[in-house]
Amino acid sequence: MRLSSLIHASALAFALAFAVPAHAAPDDAGIRATIESFRTAIIDKDRERFLGLFVQQDVPWQSVLEDRSLAQLQTTRPQAVKARFKQENNPVAFIDGIVASKNASEETFSNVRIDSDGDVATVNFDYTFLSNGTATNWGKECWLMVRTEAGWKITSLAYSVILPPAKNAD
């Protein structure tokens, strides 16, 4: 074997070693089961199941208003800001509001994308939040997750908020 062929073969072997993942395929099924449990816990108003999906109950939960929605909201609430952090915006407050409400609630998910190495994951999707079957807001939602001994848990959540256009008072 010539030296140039040996160098080429070594370079190819080196490149392939880094192209092949070191871990087995990530547990997309477990992540998808967590997404489904999130969805059905909202429908069922199941506080315990919902809170069990988080690594802790007060994980960061951040919303950001889409520009048109912010402008629309500022017509009645001038103090509204695009991405205001609120300590009380967390999984506990969210599910407690749903459980206390007489309205039927549901969050639907589409275009789910998962990126994981089997131990950490990012999950991104389009969502629509429904109250009594009517969309109240929608946008993109992103989760950071970790795989624990008890399965996949959400460590933080961020989402954009697009509101339905205001109805004209004609």
Image (cartoon, rainbow, N blue to C red):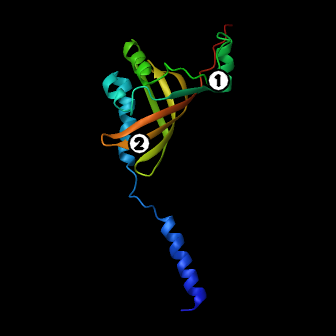
Look at the numbered disc 1 and give the secondary structure of its residue: loop
Give how far across and how far down residue 142 sits, in percent.
51, 36
Instruction: Report the residue that reaches farthest toward the bottom.
Output: 1
| Label 1 neighbour load within 10 Å: few <14, some 14-19, many 20+ | some
Residue type at mark 1 is Lys
Q: Which residue is found at the position 41% from the left and 14% from the top? A: 103
State left or right for residue 46 relative to residue 19.
Answer: left
Query: Looking at the image, which residue is at 36% across and 46% down?
Result: 29
The image quadrant that residue 45 belongs to is: top left
Q: CA distance from mark 2 to mark 1?
A: 28 Å
| Number of marks | 2
Numbered badge on residue 82:
1
From the viewer's perspective, is residue 57 above or below residue 14? above
Residue 150 visible in the snapshot: yes
Q: Earlier in the sequence, mark 2 or mark 1?
A: 1
Q: Nearer the viewer, residue 68 or 9?
A: 9
Label 2 residue SS: strand
Q: Along the line of sight, which residue is nearer the eye, 32 or 116? A: 116
Locate residue 148: give its quadrant.
top left
Q: Where in the figure is residue 129, as x and y percent of width and height? A: 49, 25
Q: Position of residue 2 (x, y in %)?
A: 57, 91
Q: Compared to 11, does 147 lie above or below?
A: above
Quadrant in which the C terminus appears: top right
Give the amino acid at mark 2. Val
As drawn, which residue projects farthest toward the top?
A: 170
Q: Is residue 113 above or below residue 133?
A: below
Residue 138: mark in rendering: none
Q: Residue at x 44, y 52 (%)?
A: 117
Visible residue check, residue 46:
no
Point out residue 51 in the picture as x, y percentages from the top left corner: 36, 27
Kindly identify which residue carries mark 2: 146
Mark in the foreground, 2 or 1: 2
